[in-house]
Amino acid sequence: MSKLAYMVVDARSSDPDRMVEYRRLAQIAVAHYGGRYLVRGAAYETLEGSWQPQRLVVLEFPSMAAARAFYDSPEYRAAREARAGVSDFDILLVDAY
């Protein structure tokens, strides 16, 4: 049985209006590849260190392979193109324990 995988995203954007289309396309791709959102821009508190994400997003996928398939998919490529030039993302993919 595959372990779950988590995608952690620090999303920064200079154009909230352009990000509306990105989010619409990304949601479709996430669902298509078995993912689900656990956190989407919710309030957070930094307990240690200096990390201050602008918009924190955490997604769960059924496996690392499913998460990679999502990220490399034509559906998510279209979403990335929708945010090109107005956003900067840091993305981590990690296996569950």
Image: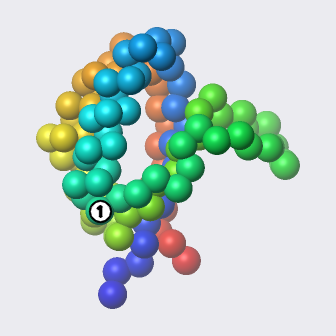
On screen, residue 32 above or below 14? below
- The picture places residue 91, in percent across and down from the top left corner, at 47, 43
Residue 68 appears in the figure: no
Q: Element type at marker 1?
A: loop
Q: Residue at x 27, y 35 (%)?
A: 25
The residue labelled by disc 1 is 34
Where 16 falls versus 46 (above or below)? above
How far across and down, in percent of the image, does residue 55 sit? Answer: 59, 33
For the N terminus, the image quarter is bottom left
> In the image, is 81 to the left or to the right of 13?
left
Q: Residue at x 35, y 59 (%)?
A: 35
The amino acid marked with disc number 1 is: Gly
In the rendered view, would you say 31 is above or below 90? below
Number of residues whose C-alpha sits closer than 10 Å to that of mark 1, classed few (under 14), some (14–19) or many (20 or more): some
Q: Is residue 15 left or right of residue 26?
A: right
Q: Residue at x 79, y 37 (%)?
A: 50
From the viewer's perspective, tell me whether residue 24 is left or right of residue 49: left
Quadrant of the snapshot with the C terminus: bottom right
Quick one: which residue is furthest to the bottom in this view?
A: 1
Q: How is the image coloured?
A: rainbow
